């Protein structure tokens, strides 16, 4: 029999981690509220109605947008990794982002007056189709060849991007496409980011299927053996990943590396049992992206560096360290 | 009892399995034997409903196995596959815990915890229970998966090459545990085994496959004769008895 | 005694080249012919370099799905171009002589590749898969940086960068071309003398070593050659990401041989043929100057996916 005291101390350790993470996130969020071009001090909020206005219209929405994006992208990344059973993928390297872009481009060309919500629907639908196609392809690749899947994803994304580029070149929209290529939050205002709550909601929803995703990550055979409806879990995962990616691209732009780096970091320490690790994945994603956004606001003050760029460099460095820094296996 | 009638898999000139009829008794150990490429693993996967046959049917305790809902089937039958490559990092204890999923859907009861502790104990995994799967050796990982199937606590247990990565001690131990599961708890066990001596000395029943067909089957003492084994493997096999158990001599 | 398929490819290429040179020749004949000759030489050399480099990379990594584009060459080139235009402005960047620009691009890419190869390979005990993954991650990072700089540009600056984002054969500088050809000839000469040892290296590190081939040294040498070929061709014309994938799959299925004496020339010829024929069609029939590279990327990628789905790539 397992020692119940040991079990309890592990659960308590998990709770402590979550509490600590919550405190850190709160601290970061507080900093984020008071950093920006327009000076805002905590004291002013109480006395100055204009400061309150700034807080409500710009700073709070921006902070919320960053937290939601970071958390939901990290969750999308970990789900993607379990679905294709590969640690080196994320929605950005499996064609999901490119498919969403293609959908956005199509809708921009065909019906330029389409409101944001319509664009979001188009991007989601095409991301869904793109992701499903990739997963079908990835399942034909033997799991013993771990490098094949990210490379296939890269080629797949390249093919989709070549389509987008071809049409963008003919219509002189290439630089316009670039707007979606870099995720940043300086344009986030109340009324222009609320779609992200949907992404956050999806991330929360996926927690209810945490065990199912973990089992699916063990492979089709084991899932069937345990009586899991594998197809349904796969479908739910694809929908979650695609919708989250599309929502994020439409509202703030592409954010590479979050879905790749955060799950790998957490998996190293906690493993992949999502029941325990999903909240930590979400919290780490949110915290790291917020940190990058704050840094982006401060590094070239009064100008901004997009959070996506800061995270791109930081994420690449962390990932390379994880890849090369570990002691080679004997 | 598992009753297999007219089972075929694969189309074309050379199907992988071709019109298999077999009966696998409950509460016994049945070994699927035969040369390489005979279709043993395919048959096991068909019984486990991991593959769908092109023709024929399988009845499990009197029910058409294909019509049993996945969640229900998972409470009747547990499978340990041959290829256990897992990319995600899961702890041994959590893996074995997933064996209780068909019963509890993730909300572990006291009975579930007891079953998990039991499985850990029985397969000697206590010192490894907090380790991640990718930190284990091949044999340790194999034992973890077998323990998971054990924790599933099903009437039927299907194992594809369970001895592959195990050393002498653990291989013998596993077979002894399977024996006691069959004798004391009445579980039906189906194994694919390459080592002929493990097959005939531990199992009650054999089903021999060759080129996708069932060549002979029945209780070990009757079916696994020197003549039939010699024909099956196209290698001279002599059967002697050591300590009352059959022993196949084919090494030279 | 050359292989008949190689001879056939050579004839096809000669025909395509003649068509490219003389089709629709009007006006100041000598002048146009000279322009077309430079362009043709550019197409031929870029094609040969990409084809050969991809075959070499696949041999030395024992992996039939790799192409140098995965390893961040294209991304670095784009970052470099974007950085130059953003840093020096339109006027400043256009004042750089073509030859100097070419040499700068080629040198930076080659330097970066050599640093990557030597540092990562020695760190990972010659685990080339890990090196490729490193290249992929660096490529993603370069792309992120490029996208950031491009956001800051005004549309006229961006249009300059856009013109360099895809391989262009129109404005190739003849001095740069001469330098590129010289370097490539050196590489090809080495390959000509060493093609047999590559056949052995393709068997895998352990087998090659037990046959007495100094695998790791050879690997580094070949990687240097790959770096040189890719840097030079990219600096000359610009990136064509998946041309290599297209070419090696075609070369393998046409030659059905593991011998580099056949594979390397076949890949070079097929690659040049695709570029020359493609450029002829796009320039003279479809009147689309800039999109050949995009279409090749699309086709190469699509073929790769098709082979993957068919289980032909393992």
Image (spheres, coloured by chain):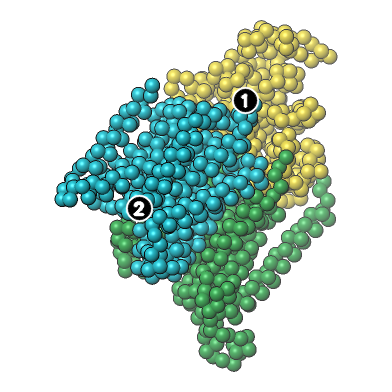
Chain colours: A green, B yellow, C cyan
Q: Depth check: A36 or B35 in front? A: A36
Left or right, C272 with respect to B252, comes to: left
| Residue found at the very far bottom of the displayed protein | A47
Q: Is residue C267 above or below residue A18?
A: above
Image coords of residue C238 (percent x, y): 40, 52
Residue drawn at the location 37% of the way across and 68% of the way down:
C91
Identify the residue under disc 2: C173
Identify the residue under disc 1: C211
Whole-angstrom CA distance, mark 2 to mark 1, is 45 Å
Estimate how packed mark 2 is, as few (under 14), some (14 to 19) or many (20 or more) residues with alpha carbons within 10 Å.
some
Image coords of residue C36 (percent x, y): 27, 47
Chain label for disc 1: C
Estimate how packed mark 1 is, as few (under 14), some (14 to 19) or many (20 or more) residues with alpha carbons within 10 Å.
few
Q: Is residue C133 above or below residue A279?
A: above
Q: Depth check: A206 or C248 in front? A: C248
Chain label for disc 2: C
Q: Earlier in the sequence, mark 2 or mark 1?
A: 2
Left or right, C246 with respect to C127, comes to: left
In which quadrant will I find the N terminus of chain C? top left
Residue drawn at the location 40% of the way across and 67% of the way down:
C92
What is the secondary structure assignment of the residue under circle 1? loop
Q: Is residue C73 above or below residue A44?
A: above
Left or right, A214 with respect to C223, comes to: right
Image coords of residue C243 (percent x, y): 40, 43
Image quarter for residue C305?
top left
Q: Is residue C137 visible?
A: yes
Residue drawn at the location 58% of the way across and 38% of the way down:
C219
**Discs 2 and 1 carry the same chain letter:** yes
């Amino acid at each position: 029999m397992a020692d119940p005291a040991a079990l309890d101390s592990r659960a308590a350790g998990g709770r402590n981690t979550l509490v600590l993470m919550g405190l850190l996130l709160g601290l970061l969020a507080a900093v984020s509220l008071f950093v920006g071009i327009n000076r805002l001090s905590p004291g002013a909020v109480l006395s100055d109605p204009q400061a309150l206005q700034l807080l409500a219209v710009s700073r709070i929405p921006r902070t919320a947008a960053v937290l939601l994006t970071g958390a939901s992208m990290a969750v999308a990344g970990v789900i993607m990794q379990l679905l294709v059973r590969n640690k080196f993928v994320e929605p950005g390297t499996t064609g999901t982002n490119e498919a969403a872009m293609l959908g956005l481009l199509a809708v921009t060309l065909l019906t330029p007056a389409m409101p944001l919500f319509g664009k979001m629907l188009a991007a989601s639908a095409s991301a869904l189709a793109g992701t499903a196609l990739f997963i079908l392809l990835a399942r034909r690749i033997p799991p013993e060849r771990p490098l094949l899947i990210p490379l296939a994803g890269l080629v797949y994304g390249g093919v989709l991007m070549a389509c987008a580029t071809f049409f963008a070149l003919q219509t002189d929209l290439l630089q316009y496409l670039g707007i979606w290529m870099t995720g940043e939050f300086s344009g986030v205002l109340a009324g222009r980011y609320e779609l992200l709550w949907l992404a956050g909601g999806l991330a929360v929803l996926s927690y209810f299927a945490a065990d199912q995703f973990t089992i699916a990550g063990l492979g089709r055979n084991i899932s069937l053996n345990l009586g899991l409806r594998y197809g349904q879990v796969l479908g739910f995962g694809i929908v979650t990943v695609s919708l989250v990616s599309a929502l994020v691209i439409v509202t703030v732009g592409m954010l590479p590396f979050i879905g790749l780096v955060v799950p790998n970091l957490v998996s190293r320490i906690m493993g992949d049992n999502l029941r325990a690790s999903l909240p930590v994945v979400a919290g780490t994603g949110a915290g790291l992206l917020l940190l990058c956004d704050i840094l982006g606001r401060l590094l070239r003050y009064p100008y901004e560096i997009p959070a996506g760029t800061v995270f791109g460099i930081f994420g690449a460095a962390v990932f390379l360290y994880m890849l090369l820094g570990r002691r080679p296996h004997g | 009892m598992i009753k297999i009638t007219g089972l075929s898999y694969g189309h074309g000139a050379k199907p992988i399995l071709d019109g298999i009829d077999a009966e696998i008794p409950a509460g016994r150990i049945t070994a699927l034997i035969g040369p390489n490429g005979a279709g043993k693993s395919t048959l096991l996967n068909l019984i486990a409903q991991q593959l769908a046959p092109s023709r024929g049917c399988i009845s499990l305790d009197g029910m058409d196995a294909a019509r049993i809902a996945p969640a229900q089937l998972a409470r009747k039958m547990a499978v340990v596959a041959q290829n256990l490559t897992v990319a995600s990092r899961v702890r041994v204890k959590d893996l074995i815990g997933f064996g209780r999923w068909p019963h509890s859907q993730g909300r572990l009861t006291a009975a579930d915890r007891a079953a998990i502790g039991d499985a850990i104990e029985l397969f000697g995994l206590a010192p490894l229970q907090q380790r991640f799967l990718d930190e284990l050796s091949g044999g340790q990982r194999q034992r973890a998966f077998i323990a998971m199937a054990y924790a599933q606590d099903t009437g039927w247990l299907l194992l594809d090459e369970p001895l592959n990565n195990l050393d002498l001690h653990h291989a013998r131990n596993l077979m002894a545990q399977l024996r006691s599961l069959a004798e004391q708890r009445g579980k039906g066990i189906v194994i694919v085994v390459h080592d002929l001596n493990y097959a005939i000395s531990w199992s009650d029943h054999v089903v021999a496959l060759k080129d996708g067909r069932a060549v002979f089957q029945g209780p070990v003492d009757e079916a696994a004769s020197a003549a039939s084994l010699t024909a099956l493997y196209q290698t001279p096999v002599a059967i002697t008895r050591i300590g009352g158990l059959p022993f196949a001599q084919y090494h030279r | 005694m050359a292989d008949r398929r190689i001879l056939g490819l050579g004839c096809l290429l000669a025909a395509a080249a003649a068509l490219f040179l003389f089709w629709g020749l009007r006006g100041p004949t000598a002048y146009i012919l000279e322009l077309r000759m430079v362009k043709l030489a550019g197409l031929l050399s870029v094609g040969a370099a990409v084809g050969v480099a991809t075959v070499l990379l696949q041999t030395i990594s024992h992996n039939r799905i790799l192409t140098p584009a995965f390893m961040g060459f294209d991304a670095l080139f784009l970052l470099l171009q974007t950085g130059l235009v953003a840093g020096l402005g339109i006027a400043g960047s256009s004042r750089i002589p073509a030859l100097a620009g070419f040499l700068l691009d080629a040198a930076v890419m080659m330097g970066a590749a050599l640093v990557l190869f030597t540092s990562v390979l020695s760190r990972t005990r010659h685990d080339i898969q890990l090196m490729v993954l490193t290249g992929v991650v660096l490529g993603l990072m370069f792309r992120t940086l490029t996208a950031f700089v491009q956001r800051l540009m005004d549309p006229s600056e961006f249009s300059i960068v856009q013109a360099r984002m895809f391989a262009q054969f129109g404005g190739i500088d003849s001095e740069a071309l001469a330098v590129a050809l010289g370097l490539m000839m050196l590489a090809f000469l080495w390959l000509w003398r060493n093609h047999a040892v590559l056949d052995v290296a393709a068997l895998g590190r352990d087998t090659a070593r037990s046959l007495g081939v100094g695998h790791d040294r050879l690997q580094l040498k070949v990687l240097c050659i790959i770096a040189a070929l890719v840097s030079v061709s990219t600096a000359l014309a610009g990136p064509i990401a998946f041309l290599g994938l297209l070419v090696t799959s075609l070369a393998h299925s046409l030659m059905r041989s593991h011998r580099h004496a056949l594979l390397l020339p076949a890949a070079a010829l097929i690659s040049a043929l695709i570029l020359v024929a493609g450029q002829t069609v796009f320039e003279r029939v479809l009147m689309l100057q800039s999109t050949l590279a995009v279409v090749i990327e699309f086709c190469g990628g699509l073929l790769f996916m098709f082979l993957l789905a068919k289980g032909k790539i393992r």
